[in-house]
Image (cartoon, coloured by chain):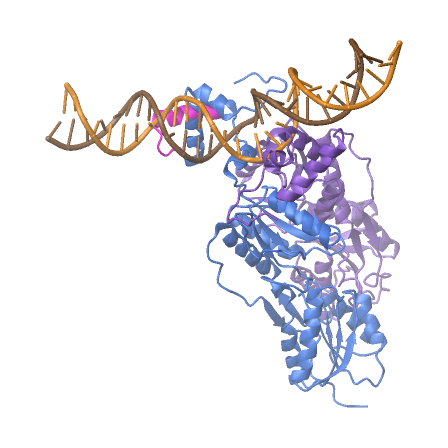
Chain colours: A purple, B blue, C brown, D orange
Amino acid sequence: MTEPSAARPRPTMVDVARQAGVSHQTVSRYLRSGGAGLKEATRVRVQAAITELGYRPNLVARSMRTRRTGRLAILLPGVNFPSPNRVIAGAVESAHAEGYVVEVLSLEGGPAARAERMAELRDSGQVEGILALAPVAADSGSRTGGGPAVVVSADYDDRMRGLGEIADGSAVRELVEGLAGAGHRRFLHVSGPREFASARGRRRSYLRAVEEFGLQSHGVAEGDWSAASGTEAVRSLAPDSGVTAVVAANDVVAAGVVRGAAERGWRVPADLSVTGWDNDPVGACMPPSLTTVDVDLEALGARAMRRLVCAVRGTAPPPADGPFHRVLWRESTGPVPSRSD
Amino acid sequence: MTEPSAARPRPTMVDVARQAGVSHQTVSRYLRSGGAGLKEATRVRVQAAITELGYRPNLVARSMRTRRTGRLAILLPGVNFPSPNRVIAGAVESAHAEGYVVEVLSLEGGPAARAERMAELRDSGQVEGILALAPVAADSGSRTGGGPAVVVSADYDDRMRGLGEIADGSAVRELVEGLAGAGHRRFLHVSGPREFASARGRRRSYLRAVEEFGLQSHGVAEGDWSAASGTEAVRSLAPDSGVTAVVAANDVVAAGVVRGAAERGWRVPADLSVTGWDNDPVGACMPPSLTTVDVDLEALGARAMRRLVCAVRGTAPPPADGPFHRVLWRESTGPVPSRSD
DNA sequence: AACAATAAAGTGAACGTTCACTTTTTCTGT
DNA sequence: ACAGAAAAAGTGAACGTTCACTTTATTGTT
C-alpha cells in the first residue's frame, strides 16, 4: 500500500529499478523478454517492485526509441461520403489479430490538402502503416526509404490499386446471365452516383453483360442509392418500354423499384423482375424477398489489412483468396412474363 | 535539390537549424507558434530550410516531451458483438472537429482481461482520453490524478453511465400509446437478446407502457435481432390469441413478423399492425413500409465524444440536447381490425 | 584449484522534441 | 549617445525508454 498522494507522478522504469535494487536496464530486459536471461531471484524482485509501484511502461517513450508503434492507420474520405463501416470493421479486426492497434482518421479538403495530411501522418512517426480507403496520390505504392507502408484501396477513385474488389461489379454479369436464362430480353439499370467507383463498376458490368449476351438495354437511370430514385425510374418508364427486368444499384434502390412497380400495378416478379445488391437483412425477407449480391465486406477489409501488415513487416503478401461476391436468387426475380400486350 | 541517397534518415529539427543557421530552439518556436516572435528574416530562413530538407516534425518525440498526443481512443467490445458503427462514425467525426485523432480498439477476453487492457492503455501515455463503448469497470468516472479522461458508454452493460441513451427504449411507450389510440388492446413484443441493454430497454419500456395504458400483453417472444425470430413468433401465435399489434425489437425482426403474418394469411396492417426500430432504409419503402423509430446514432456518438473532449480539456460538459428518438408512423400500422371472430 | 567460457547485470548515450533559463540584439526615451 | 527595457535567439537539460558496450558473477573443464 502506498499513500495516495494527490498528483503523484507515474513511476518510471528507474523508480522500479531503485525499488528492486537493480539497474534500469534489468527492468527493461524483464519487460521486454518477460524475464528470459534473468536469475529467478532478480525476476521475482523486479516483478514485486512493478506491482508494488503499479508501474506500467510509457509506450510513447518506447516508440520514440524503437521507432515502432504497433499502430496502423485507416484513412477515410471526408464526412460527405458514407464510411464503408463493414470494411473498416473487418480491417480493424484483422489488425488486432496481428497485434496492431488501428487509428481511424478522415481526410478532409481537396486533393492537395489530403496529400499534405497524408504526408504529415506518414512522417509523424506515429504509425507503421497506412490503409487508405480514401483516394490519395500515393507517390509510392508500398514503402519508400524506411517510411511507413501504404496500401491504397479507395472505393471511389479511378486509380484503384490493391483492393479494387470493393468496387468490383462483375457479379452483375451473373445476375444478367441468370435473368437472360429466365427469358428476359429487355433490361433497365438504375445506377448509383457516378462518383462512386462501386456504382461505376456495376454500371460497366451491366452494359458489358447486356452486350455480351445479345440483350437489349432500355438504358441506365441515374440514381443516388436512394429508394426514391428507384421508384422514380419505374414511374418514368413508358408503358410500352418492354422492360421486364430491372438491375438496381443496391437493395435500397431495388426496394424503391418494387414500390414503383406496385404503384403501376405491376407484380414482382410476375410482371417485373428486380435485383439488388448488398444482401440487406430487411430486403432478405420483405415481400418479395430481394434477389441480391452478398458481398463479404468484412473479408475485403480484412484482406486489405493483411496486405498492409505484410507490407509493414516486409513479408510476402498473402495469396489471393475469394471470391467475396455471391448471387442470392430470391423472390423478386422470376421467369419473363408471357407476352400479353 | 538534394541527392536522393538510398536510405537517408529523416531530417530532424537540428538539421533544419544547421541549414538555416539558427538554433534548434528557434526552429521549435517557428513550428510551434508559426513564426510569431521571430524576425521576418529568420522566419524566411527557417521556412526555406524546412522546405529544402523536406522536414516534418516527429510527433512521437513531441508527445514524449509534452505528454500531449492529440489522440483519443474508442474502446469496443470484442468481435462477437456487432459494433455500433453509426455511433462510432458520429464520435469520430466529432473528435476530428475538435482536432483530435481517434484510435479504435476492441477489448477481448473476460472482465479481468479487459480491465487490464484498459489500464494499460490508460497508462501508456498514448491517448488523452478514452471513450468506452464496451463495458469496463471504470474505477474512476472521469480523470484520476492527471491520467487520461474516461467516458464509459456501454450499450449492453447494466452499469450504464453517461450515454445510456443508446439503450434508451422509451420511444416504445410512444409506439404503444399510438397503437392504443388506434384501438389496439392486445400486444405482442418480439424482443432482442437479453445481453443487449438496448434490447432490455425496449422490453422494459414495452411492459411498462402496456401496464400504464391498461392494455394486455400476450407476452414477450424472445428474439435475436433476426427476421427468422420475428417470423417464428408469429407462426407460434395461437389463432385466438387476440393479438392485433406486434412491437418488434427492430426493423429486421419487424420484416420477419410481416412475413410470418403473410404466411398465415394476415394482412398488414389490416389484420395486424407491426412496428420496428432503427428506420432501416429498406424497411422505409418495403410493402408495407414499416412504422419505426428513427434513432440519431451519429448524434449520440458525437455527444459522447463531446463529453469526452470536455473532460479531457477540463471544461464544463456540454448542455443536454436531444431528443434523438423520433417515431415514424408508416404503412405497417393502422386501426385495429373490427372484431369478426 | 585455476582458468576460460558463458551468463547476468550494469553504464552511459541516444532517440527528437520542448522547457526553463540565460545571453545577445534591438528598440525607446531623454 | 547612453541607460534601460523589451524583443529575439541561444544553451543545456529533461521526457522514459532501449541500444551498444563493459563489467561482474557464475558455471564447467582439466
Quadrant, the C terminus of chain A: bottom right
Front residue of A11 and A261 = A11
Residue A198 locus on image (x, y percent): 70, 47
Coordinates of residue C26 in the picture (x, y in percent): 27, 25
Of the pair A253 and B338, the residue shown nearer to us? B338
Which residue is more in the foreground, A271 or B214? Answer: B214
For the point 65% across and 70% down, the residue is: B169
Drawn side of residue B200 relative to residue C27, left or right = right
Left or right, residue C24 beside residue A175: left
Residue sitting nearer the eye, A50 or A229: A50
Image point 85% across, 64% down: which residue?
A: A337
| Residue A37 visible (yes or no) | yes
Task: Where is residue B136? Give x, y as percent.
Answer: 66, 56
Q: How many marks?
A: 0
Placement of C7 over or under B288, stated as above or below? above
Residue A177 at what x, y percent from top left?
A: 85, 50
Q: Give the side of residue B315 with respect to residue A231, left or right.
A: left
Residue displayed at 69% across by 64% down: B280
Q: Is residue B35 magenta?
A: yes
Read off the magenta span: B34-52
Majority secondary structure in the magenta region: helix
Any magenta on residue B58?
no
Residue A136 visible in image? no
Q: Check the image and report above or below for A198 versus A24.
A: below
Residue B36 placement: quadrant: top left
